[in-house]
């Protein structure tokens, strides 16, 4: 039976680092939502901004992934690009052509994931996993986004950073993670457009279905890598699933901000960089958007 492995994680952030008070919408949003300037409470710190192109961010991150993997562009069977920024019209060069050329992806078929907001990358990883289980060897997965209008940089739930993240989903067992299972659901909010509706039931259903299928408990999870939204939002929404404070990776909320759908992958890379004690632990990636919830279960691979 085929298996799929997630390896060679890389990420690139915008070259400019800014303090949260520099965000154009900071004061307006704080007044509107009566949010006091209490950085430690909310997890406010810094954000990253780029003057470069989205394609440049994506290419740099993908190159790092290829270098880590030891593969060439010609070894890649498919590429899944997750972004809500890319647009092309008649008479324009499609962005995927530039990406394929720059990375020398000689035969990789490009697939774009544009719906789902901050769940896009986990959706892309699901697609890549399915492709590998169906017989492909190497699928490159990319997420890249940036804020186009600085008025939207600081929101009442997150401070956005520009950046890209990438990884390889492969049939080759090696250093990284086996992709065990996933679960994604939509809720009433996505159908009725209730942006701030209570999504507790959606979170619970997604979480419980995935764990039940794998015959696991929440306590079995070594770490949960989730979106870098503000700490009160994060702790409430993930905590009500029974996820303990020690299971949540929170280091990047203030350090990097919310990198759209790339957060959980970036956080996984940084969590791994801490060093592990030889455990074949279970890790959960999570992501959510209005009326959407996605979770991906991984198990650390200790040796090839």
Image (spheres, rainbow, N blue to C red):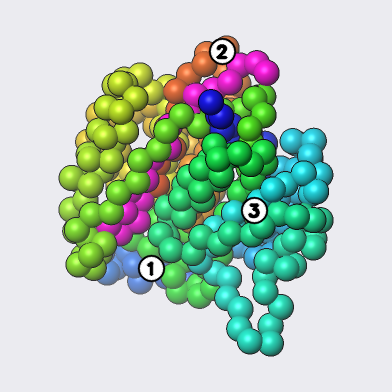
Region in magenta: 288-304
Dot 1: element: helix
Residue 140 rendering spot, x and y as whole percentages: 65, 47
The residues tagged by marks 2 and 1 sit, at their Cα atoms, a distance apart of 44 Å
- Quarter of the image that includes the C terminus: top right
Q: Residues within 10 Å of mark 1 (few under 14, many from 20)?
A: some
Q: Is residue 1 above or below residue 183?
A: above
Q: Given this view, does label 2 or label 1 mark the residue nearer the observer? A: 2
Pointer 2 with pointer 1, Cβ within 8 A: no
Check disc 2: other Cα within 10 Å, few if <14, some if 14-19, many if 20+: few
In the shown orientation, is residue 44 left or right of residue 202?
A: right
Placement of 159 over or under 3, stated as above or below: below
Q: Badge 1 is on which residue?
A: 27
Give how far apart the Cα atoms at labels 3 and 1 are. Answer: 40 Å
Which residue corresponds to the image point at 38% horizontal and 23% vertical from the top-left? 221
**Between 39 and 120, the one nearer to me in the picture:** 120
Sequence order check, earlier mark of 3 and 2: 3
Indicate left or right for 253 with 61 as reference.
left
Q: Is residue 296 magenta?
A: yes
């Amino acid at each position: 039976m085929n298996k799929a492995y997630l390896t060679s994680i890389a990420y690139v952030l915008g070259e400019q680092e800014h303090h949260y008070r520099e965000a154009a919408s900071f004061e307006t949003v704080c007044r509107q939502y009566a949010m006091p300037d209490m950085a430690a409470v909310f997890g406010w710190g810094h954000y990253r901004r780029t003057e470069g192109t989205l394609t440049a961010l994506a290419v740099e991150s993908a190159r790092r992934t290829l270098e880590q993997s030891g593969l060439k562009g010609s070894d890649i069977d498919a590429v899944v690009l997750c972004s809500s920024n890319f647009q092309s019209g008649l008479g324009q060069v499609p962005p995927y052509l530039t990406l394929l050329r720059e990375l020398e992806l000689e035969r990789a078929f490009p697939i774009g994931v544009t719906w789902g907001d901050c769940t896009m990358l986990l959706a892309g990883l699901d697609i890549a996993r399915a492709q590998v289980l169906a017989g492909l060897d190497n699928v490159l997965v990319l997420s890249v986004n940036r804020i186009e209008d600085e008025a939207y940089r600081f929101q009442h739930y997150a401070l956005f950073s520009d950046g890209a993240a990438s990884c390889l989903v492969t049939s080759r067992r090696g250093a990284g993670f086996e992709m065990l299972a996933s679960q994604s659901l939509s809720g009433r909010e996505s159908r009725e457009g209730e942006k701030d509706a209570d999504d507790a039931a959606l979170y619970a259903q997604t979480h419980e279905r995935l764990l039940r299928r794998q015959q696991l408990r929440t306590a079995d999870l070594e770490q949960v890598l989730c979106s870098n939204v503000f700490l009160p939002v994060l702790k409430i929404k993930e905590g009500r699933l029974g996820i303990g404070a020690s299971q949540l990776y929170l280091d990047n909320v203030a350090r990097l901000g919310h990198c759209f759908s790339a957060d959980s992958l970036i956080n996984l890379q940084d969590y791994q960089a801490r060093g592990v004690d030889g455990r074949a632990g279970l890790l959960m990636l999570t992501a959510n958007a209005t009326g959407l919830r996605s979770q991906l279960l991984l198990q650390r691979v200790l040796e090839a």
